[in-house]
Image (spheres, rainbow, N blue to C red):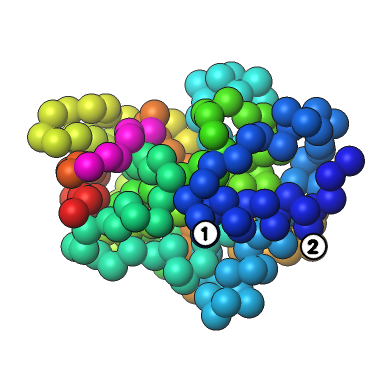
Amino acid sequence: MISPDDIAKQLIVAERERTPIAAFTDANPDLDVDTAYLAQQAFVQAKLDAGERVVGAKLGLTSRAKQEAMGVDSPLSGVVTSGMLAPFGAPIDLSGLIHPRVEPEIAFVLARDVEAPATVSSVLAATETVCAAIDVIDSRYEEFRFRLPDVIADNASAARFLVGPQSVSPDQIGDLRLLGCVVRANGDVAATAAGAAAMGHPAAAVAWLANSLAQRGAMLKAGWTVFSGGLTAPIALSGKSFVTVEFDGLGTIEAFTG
């Protein structure tokens, strides 16, 4: 069985050189989730050793449709570091990415730690504000054909994150399940969704993450931004692309390439 360190080393090279690699489960079909999370830790540690810091966390596969497509029955999580946060209003530099795609999300900025057992209510109580966000995902694998441990090891395909200019307290925004968004790609409507697409309630997704982290001896920390999972199918970015995400009550956020 391949070791977590070996997995991380290959992912680090793939990301640095923009050279996609084969999914690890192709040659290691018995690769398990626990080993994959250890590989993720090593992958992220390389970024921390280079001077970045942990600023949040992200969820993936929070929608039932995505879970069914992957043949799994639960979400997964990744770590967000300072180097992944793209400046608001600046174009996304694709030169360091392999095959980037974007997903609209609802982000939670935490006022205090979220301890297990977490619930929707405890997550909302711990949240300072929510805001519109775009998750720029970028798998380091050759094809979009991989299993759950591959995605986990790859830090949930984390690449870049954009956060909208408006931050609103949960009490002011109302029912997050009904919070709608419209995604436009190069001016055309590409998708619509609501907050309920993330595990029925985006705060439920964050609660799942808090409880999952507790099982691994970790927690969601005050000051972190937590990205609660894509609400639509991902939209590819290439060449000169322009994606706009408009959320009810949270304003508009744009992702565009040079």
Residue 236 on the magenta segment: yes
Which residue is labeled 2 in the image?
217
Amino acid type indicated by mark 1: Arg
What is the secondary structure assignment of the residue under circle 1? Answer: helix
Local crowd size for mark 2, using a 10 Å CA cut-off: few (<14), some (14–19), many (≥20): few
Local crowd size for mark 1, using a 10 Å CA cut-off: few (<14), some (14–19), many (≥20): few
Q: Which mark is residue 29?
A: none
Q: Which mark is residue 16?
A: 1
Residue at the right extreme? Answer: 1
Compared with residue 51, is residue 204 higher up or lower down, i.e. above or below? above
Q: Which residues are magenta?
A: 234-239
Q: Quadrant of the C terminus?
A: bottom left
Q: Is residue 162 visible?
A: yes
Residue 150 on the magenta segment: no
**Residue drawn at x 28%, y 56% as measured from the top left:** 92
**Residue drawn at x 30%, y 57% as measured from the top left:** 93
Whichever of callouts 2 and 1 sits on the residue coming sooner in the sequence is 1
Whole-number angstrom distance, CA of label 2 to CA of label 1: 30 Å
**Residue drawn at x 81%, y 33% as measured from the top left:** 28
Q: Quadrant of residue 148?
A: top right
Q: Is residue 121 visible?
A: no
Q: Main secondary structure of the magenta part?
A: loop
Compared with residue 175, is residue 113 higher up or lower down, i.e. above or below? below
Q: Quadrant of the N terminus?
A: top right
Name the spot of residue 116 as percent of width and height, x first. 72, 57
Q: Nearer the viewer, residue 123 or 233?
A: 233
Name the spot of residue 40 as percent of width and height, x first. 68, 54
